[in-house]
Image (cartoon, helix red, strand yellow):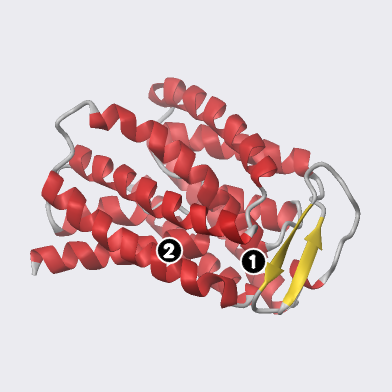
Amino acid sequence: MFFVSLLVAGLFVGLLSSFLGIGGGSIIVPVLTLVFHIPIHVAIATSLISVVFASSNASAEYIKKGIPNLKIGLLLETITVIFAILGGLLSVSIKEKYLFISFGIILFITAYFYVRNIISKNNTNSIKNNNKGYFSGSYYDESLNNHVFYTPDRLFLTTLVSSIAGFLSGMLGIGGGVFKVPAMNLISKIPIKVATTTSNFMMSLTAAVASIVYLKTNLINPVIAGLVVSGVFLGSNIGVKYFPKIKDDKIKLMFTIFLILVGVQMFLRGLK
């Protein structure tokens, strides 16, 4: 039962990572520590390794399909990494509970805008934008059976949000996908599928660098990591297969539910 549970947990994380463009640390770490009573550092190391496999596997397939915007991904990733380092250096000077509460409130606000977006049927993919720019892009949307063209709007503001996401990631040890995906989609009007797959691409780079530290230690349990990674690999493969066929509103709804769940978790941790 222990082995099966680890595989299922990995499967769920792989699906979420490929669908929503978020790291699985907010799920894998609590599950491994609270359910399986695995030491926190081993859980974090396992989470990082699983994210490497999930994001790399998914992003490779998405890049083949031409969905992610690699130019935007590299821009935001560079900014995120710089501010993540700053956040890590300053993490000892601010009480975590205030950060967790603030983080939770921001996620609730973001979820509200997504709910309003879904209700109003404001689908950014339904509008073709043929303006040419350095960060412009296009992709074939299988759910619409049509090519979608877009040009990012207010990219500077999205970059600013990404820097804040990196800062918080460094301070709290969490992924920044919960900020970067909404910023790209809601602020810069980048289609949700492009936003999530671009986030996947960014996560594969971040997790790969972060996991190097843990590979030099004895914190990685081969059995635990092997089972979780196997589940993650299977989940990400399933996600990559069905993701292009899912309608945008359903992706936004799934992301909204995830934002609320993580927001509640962060808020409760801040109240302890």
Q: Position of residue 193 (x, y in %)?
A: 63, 63
Residue tagged 1: 114
Q: CA distance from mark 1 to mark 2?
A: 18 Å
- Residue at horizontal 49 percent and vertical 36 percent from the top: 168
Mark 1: which amino acid?
Answer: Tyr
Mark 1 neighbour class, 10 Å CA radius: few under 14, some 14 to 19, many 20 or more: many
- Residue at horizontal 46 percent and vertical 57 percent from the top: 58
272, 21: nearer the viewer:
21
Q: Position of residue 167 (x, y in %)?
A: 53, 32
Q: Position of residue 119 (x, y in %)?
A: 69, 78
- Residue at horizontal 51 percent and vertical 58 percent from the top: 61
Quadrant containing the N terminus in the rendered view: bottom left
- From the viewer's perspective, is 118 left or right of 102? right
Secondary structure state at the residue bearing disc 2: helix
Mark 2: which amino acid?
Answer: Leu
In the image, is residue 174 above or below residue 93? below
Q: Position of residue 172 (x, y in %)?
A: 40, 37
Residues at discs 1 and 2 in contact (Cβ within 8 Å) = no
N-terminal of the pair, mark 1 or mark 2, is: 2
Q: Hey, which residue is sitting farthest left in the picture?
A: 1
Residue tagged 2: 16
- Residue at horizontal 19 percent and vertical 27 percent from the top: 217
